[in-house]
Image: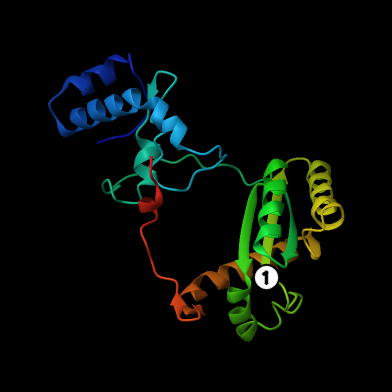
Amino acid sequence: ITTQQYRLDDPDYLEIKKSETLEGKIYREVERIAVNNKGLIDKGYPAISYNIAGYELRDVVRDNIIDLTRLFVGSEGTLGTIVEIKMTVLSKPKYSMMLIAYFKNAISMGKATYEAVQRGASAIELLDYRLMNILKTREEKLTADVPRDMEYMLGIEFDGTNLDEIETSIIELDDKISNETKLAFKTEIARTEAQLLNYWTIRKLALPLLGQINDNGRKIVPVIEDRKSVV
């Protein structure tokens, strides 16, 4: 089938829906489930700005429009196989800066993440001490400035077209989590391309090392993320 946005009263959609094909059956059933269970679906999702938990049921039918694309993409292959994709490519932001913050515990890190989200951070990436300890043995020069007593490290990125606004947001967040609330025990601002590249290189190198983490006999194993989504 081809997934795209259709108005519920669109003649093309009505023609698809009344057909006895697999596509027609899918659209009929999905519309019925989404409309009849709208209250339950809306109640089941927390108030988050970005969902990566799998099946995106909230916007399948919204404002008299049905769109199976988000549902299908979020299923990570469990609903079928994508054979062709038409994508819209966004322009790279003109400016980008990052606040790199270090924390002693997960509670402080979590509270700082909330502050970053409230200020419109474009990306928030986390590394913990287990990954960093492994990485430090392999990339001493790259990780030389990372405190050895840190538990968690956040890379909080802001981007856009106005450099002054980006810097103001970074400085305000830094002041909030470093001075006002004392959540982070050390912070640094990455302003240049070289500084940003250094952080993203650390992040990229760390991901393949997840399988090597051994926490008192417990190891990370691959799972299907969608099984965490319950509505």
Judge by depth and name the residue closer to the eye, 64 or 218. 218
Visible residue check, residue 59: no
Q: Is residue 135 above or below residue 21?
A: below
| Residue type of the residue flagged with mark 1 | Glu
Query: Which percent across, then down, holds residue 29?
Result: 23, 29
Q: Quadrant of residue 50?
A: top right
Name of the residue lying farthest toward the bottom? 137
Name of the residue lying farthest toward the left? 20
Q: Quadrant of residue 184?
A: bottom right
Q: Residue at x 32, y 15 (%)?
A: 10
Query: Which percent across, then down, holds residue 165?
Result: 81, 41
Visible residue check, residue 92: yes
Query: Which percent across, then down, holds residue 88?
Result: 48, 39
Q: Residue at x 74, y 61 (%)?
A: 100
Question: In the visual, does 231 lie left or right of 136?
Answer: left
Q: Residue at x 49, y 73 (%)?
A: 210
Q: Residue at x 72, y 79 (%)?
A: 148
Colour approach in the figure: rainbow
Tally of numbered tags: 1
Judge by depth and name the residue closer to the eye, 70 or 119. 119
Callout 1 secondary element: loop
Query: Which percent across, then down, holds residue 145?
Result: 77, 75
Q: Quadrant of the N terminus?
A: top left
Q: Quadrant of the C terminus?
A: top left
Q: Estimate how packed mark 1 is, as few (under 14), some (14 to 19) or many (20 or more) residues with alpha carbons within 10 Å.
A: some
Question: In the visual, does 4 lie left or right of 90?
Answer: left
Q: Which residue is mark 1?
A: 151
Question: In the visual, does 212 lie left or right of 77?
Answer: right
